[in-house]
Amino acid sequence: MWIPISIDKFLKLHLKKNPNKNEKVLRVRIEAALDDYKNGVKCQCGKDLWIVGSASAPFACFSCITGKEHPLGDYELESALDKRDKYGRRNIEEMDPRKINGMFDDDGYEINPNSIKKPSLCLTCLKNVDPDWEEELLCNLNRNDQANEREFKCYAYEKL
Ligand SMILES: [Zn+2]
């Protein structure tokens, strides 16, 4: 998970730990990395840049700078928390923790509900007629899990 932070706060923290660094240089690098991020410049691996990490490393994504898959309480600028991987997918571990909603697969990747096919079984199900928000979510998760199965099974099915 990211810890959202502003440029000013990050610089303060970073300079406390690294007092020999130059604040002006760091700020210029962060602003340049943020510009790149907003202009769609990616890490060489295809993922979005890690802005505060790029202040003291060549511009790159979190994984390429740290060697870790996902952040674990690492800082990132509030304005750069809409990170996507090289396939354009968002992962729950790399979203703004205050803005997480929707559906995610077992690996944490966001699922677009519009991309899920509705099996024919659902068309004769009571739950499909007037689902509430929570039911719709569970139905979609179940559909997504079985997206590649030949036969769709559902234990919540209620015949119309
Ligand atoms: Zn990378």
Image (tube, rainbow, N blue to C red):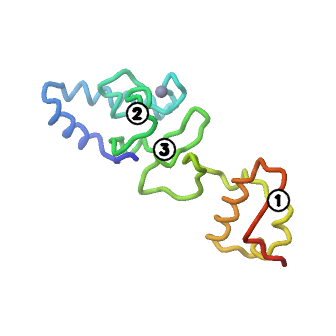
For label 1, the SS is loop
Residue located 40% across and 24% down the image = 59
Q: Is residue 111 left or right of residue 42?
A: right
Dot 2, crowdedness within 10 Å: few (<14), some or many (≥20)?
many
Farthest-out residue, bottom: 160
Relative to 133, is 1 above or below? Answer: above
The answer to which of 34 and 54 lies nearer the viewer is 54
For label 2, the SS is loop
Residue located 74% across and 69% down the image = 155
- Determine whether the beta carbon of the residue marked 1 sits less than 8 angstroms from the nearest atom of ligand 1: no
Residue picked out by circle 1: 119
Pick whichever of labels 1 and 3 is earlier in the sequence: 3
Pick whichever of labels 2 and 3 is earlier in the sequence: 2
The answer to which of 68 and 82 lies nearer the viewer is 68
Q: Percent position (x, y) of residue 10?
A: 25, 40
Q: Amino acid at mark 3?
A: Asp
Q: Amino acid at mark 1?
A: Pro
For label 3, the SS is loop
